[in-house]
Image (spheres, helix red, strand yellow):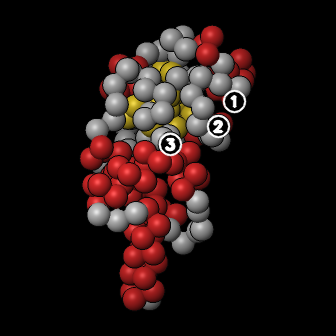
Amino acid sequence: MNNKPKSTGSKMPLYTHENNEEGSHSRRMTDEEWQAIVENEASYDGTFYYAVKTTGIFCRPSCKSRAPKKENVLLFRNANEALSEGVRPCKRCKPNGLRLPDEDWTRQIIHVIDMNYHEPFTLMRLADMCHGSPYHLHCTFKKMTGYTPKQYQKLQNQKDHREA
């Protein structure tokens, strides 16, 4: 296996393994780094960045988003390394100082809904999963798609039932 993104049809990278292999910038995580992520330690900002394999997003250690599963975390020395691996910056903590374009964020939100549409979720949970505020996520998604996230989820459920 390699550490390059696996195509999912959307532009959302999904990572397929936990080990660092040649050509990859990611590295193994120490217990101290894991605690910094879980406790949102701002004192570690700039010393490393972490990406979540399941979302394809990278953050600062101080990011206030929900803590990821440890096995889904990749570490990088700087934001450029994370970007070179195909992961995108978090909308909440802006690890590279830039905002993710609305089109890319909307694709990410759609991917998360498509992968979880059969499960009930709140706007807060979706915002946590997509690293943004509920209000901003709702407004951006509606502006870009014409639907609210809940409306889109219902459409996916209806589509699934029609195909069954």
- Image vertical order of residue 124 relative to residue 63, above or below: below
> Element type at marker 1?
helix
**Lateral position of residue 133 relative to residue 111, left or right:** right
**Secondary structure of the residue carrying numbered label 3:** loop
Residue at (43%, 45%) from the top-left corner?
A: 136
Mark earlier in primary sequence (2, 3): 2
In this orientation, does residue 3 appear?
A: no
Q: Position of residue 106 (x, y in %)?
A: 34, 51
Report the disc number at residue 160: none
Q: Position of residue 7 (x, y in %)?
A: 33, 51
Q: Which residue is located at x 34 percent, y 31 percent?
A: 99
Residue 50 pos. (x, y %): 52, 27
The answer for how far apart the CA atoms under marks 2 and 3 are is 16 Å
Per the image, the residue denoted by label 3 is 133
Pointer 2 with pointer 3, Cβ within 8 A: no
Residue type, label 3: Ser
Q: Which one is closest to the eye, mark 3 or mark 1?
A: 3
Q: Are marks 2 and 1 in contact (CB under 8 Å)?
A: yes
Q: Is residue 140 left or right of residue 75?
A: left
Lower position in the chain sequence, tag 3 or tag 1: 1
Q: Assign the N terminus to one quadrant of the image.
A: top left
Q: Amino acid at mark 2?
A: Ala
Q: Residues within 10 Å of mark 1 (few under 14, many from 20)?
A: some
Quadrant, the C terminus: bottom left
Of 78 and 1, the residue lying toward us: 78
Residue tagged by mark 2? 67
Count of picture labels: 3
The disc labelled 1 sits on which kind of residue? Val
Q: Which residue is mark 1?
A: 38
